[in-house]
Image (cartoon, rainbow, N blue to C red):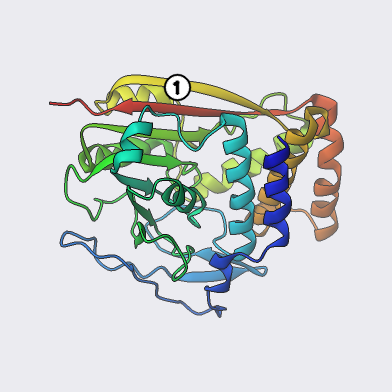
Amino acid sequence: MLSFFSRLKWLRKSKKVQNNKIKEEKSKDSSRTSDATNSNSQAKISSASFYNNGRRFQAYKDCAYILPNDDAEIDRLHLQHWIVKNVVGRNYSSPIEAELQKGIKVLDAGCGGGTWILEMANAYPNSEFTGIDVSSTWPTEIRPHNCNFVVGNIVHELPFEENSFDFIYMRLVGMGVPNEQYPTVLSHLYKALKPGGWIELVEIDGEQVYRGKRTTKFWNAVLQYLEMRGFKEGIVKDLDHKVVDAGFVNIDGMRIRIPVGSWGGKLGEVFLEDIVGAYKSLRPVVQPILNYSDADYQELLDNLPTENNEVKQEVNWFCNWAQKPAN
C-alpha cells in the first residue's frame, strides 16, 4: 500500500510527459494520424476535437466515447490505472508471465493515454507493445523503444494482419463501445489474436452497489446521454458470456468490489477522487440533462463524499481472461 500511495503522490506532483507533447488546440478540428503504419491499415482517421465548457472531446463521427480526451481526463485515467493495479496486484492476470519475459507481441486496445502499455513496455523489454485508440493522447517522443501507437477505431476492422498478437488487453472501453457493439469488437480482436494467444478484458459495472439518491440521479442522466449517443442497451453487460460467444476457451475471471469514500480507507478515498473526477469530466454533457445550475452541480460534487460514506457505496469491476483455441 505504501509504495502505491507514494507513487500516487509522485504522480500528482510530476508533469506528465504525455501532456508536454500535446499542442494546445483551438476549437477548430485538428487532424491526428498514426505514428505506426500497416499495409492493411484503416483509412486515415481525422480525430477531430471540439470544446464544450472548456473541456475537449473527440468528434470522430463513428466513435461514441462520451468522456473528454484532454489533459485533465488523462490525469484521471493515470490515477485510475494505479487504483486498478493496486487492487488486482499487477497489470494483468492472464498466465503469460514467461512469454512476456521471453518476448511476445502485445496489443492494448483502447489504450487512452498509454499508462498501462508504457509501464508494461518498461517491465518487459523483450516484448513488443502496440496501443490503438481513436484519440492520440499518448507521448509522441519519449517512450520505450518497444512501444508504438496507432490511431484507429476498435469498432471497425483493425489495421493489423490476422493472427498478429500473442496477448491483447482491453480495459474500460464501456463508455465508448455500446453493449450491442461489444461482440463486434471482440470478433475483431479474435482475428488479430494468434491461435493459443490470450485476451484480457476489464470493465466497470455502471450499476454501482448501494447507490445514494444523488449518485442514482447522476447515473440516470449518464444513461440518458448514452442513449442519445447511440447506446441502445447501455454499457457492456455479461462480459463472461460475450467472451464465450466470441469463441474463446479456458475462460477465467474475477469480480472486484472497490469502496467509494473514506469509509473504505485510503483506497476508498483515492477511488472517490477518481469518481469525482469523472463527474467533473462529464459535467458539460450531464449538467444540461439534469437541468442544474453551476451552483447545483457544485453542490452535487460537494455532497458526494458524505453520501458515499452514508450508504457505503461500492463499484463492481469485472475482469475476464481467455484463450483463443490453438487450432
Nearer-the-camera pick, 268 or 235: 268
Answer with the quarter of the image where residue 10 lies.
Answer: bottom right
Classify 2 as above or below 46. above
User: Which residue: 31% across, 22% down?
Assistant: 244
The location of residue 169, given as percent across then percent down, is 39, 40
The location of residue 24, given as percent across then percent down, is 57, 78
**Looking at the figure, which quarter contains the N terminus?**
top right
User: Which residue: 37% across, 27% down?
Assistant: 95
Classify 269 as above or below 152. above
Residue type at tag 1? Gly
Q: Which residue is mark 1?
A: 253
Classify 256 as above or below 29. above
Nearer-the-camera pick, 221 or 70: 70
Classify 150 as above or below 90. below
In the displayed image of the protein, which residue is found farthest to the left? 327
User: Which residue: 25% across, 37% down?
Assistant: 190
Q: Is residue 122 left or right of residue 155?
A: right
The residue tagged with tag 1: helix, strand or loop? strand
Q: Is residue 93 visible?
A: yes
Q: Is residue 181 visible?
A: no
Q: Is residue 225 left or right of residue 289?
A: left
Dot 1 alpha-carbon crowd within 10 angstroms: few under 14, some 14 to 19, many 20 or more: some
User: Which residue: 85% across, 57% down?
Assistant: 295
The location of residue 248, given as percent across then percent down, is 27, 25
The location of residue 225, given as percent across then percent down, is 57, 48
Nearer-the-camera pick, 269 or 82: 82
